[in-house]
Image (tube, rainbow, N blue to C red):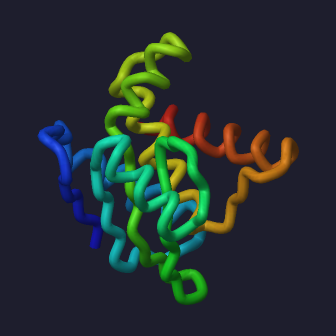
Amino acid sequence: MISFNYETDFILENKDQLERWISNTITEENCREGEINYIFCSDDYLHKLNVDFLDHDTLTDVISFDYSVGKELHGDIYISVDRVKENASDFQVSFKDEIARVIIHGVLHYCGYKDKTDADEKVMRSKEDHYLAKR
């Protein structure tokens, strides 16, 4: 089950369509959908999580807490709407496209993809692009 939660005034459009897209991505990655919670929040909210739980004193657009069991995906994906807006402007893409990229990025982490090295990041970007084209 995929759920969308809000710690800010932002509300997603087309939630049903997004749920289907995320579910189809999980299936295509040969995983099973468990309980996945998306939490949309502010920079301040996500920064506090980053400091408290990851000991990183930086702003970020997404933090994923993975509780998956094998190929059954479970977790909480926190997304800073503030950071996504700024990144969309910086990368000269629409907010809608950037929020979709961050949404799918979180679930791809649960599917086993990493982005710590340049090689891993290249694979992650390729997967994001692949699934964004299916949106």
Residue lying at 59% horizontally and 41% vertically, measured from the top left: 128
Q: Nearer the viewer, residue 25 or 58?
A: 58
**Name of the residue lying farthest toward the top:** 92
Q: Position of residue 121 (x, y in %)?
A: 76, 44
Q: Position of residue 8 (x, y in %)?
A: 18, 45
Which quadrant is the C terminus positioned in? top left
Tell whether 117 sits left or right of 1: right
Placement of 22 over or under 80, stated as above or below: below
Q: Position of residue 72 (x, y in %)?
A: 49, 82
Tell whether 131 sits left or right of 78: right
Residue lying at 48% horizontally and 76% vertically, measured from the top left: 73
Q: Nearer the viewer, residue 29 or 111?
A: 111
Placement of 30 over or under 121, stated as above or below: below
Residue lying at 55% horizontally and 60% vertically, measured from the top left: 28
Placement of 68 over or under 51, stated as above or below: below
Tell whether 10 sits left or right of 43: left
Tell whether 3 sits left or right of 48: left
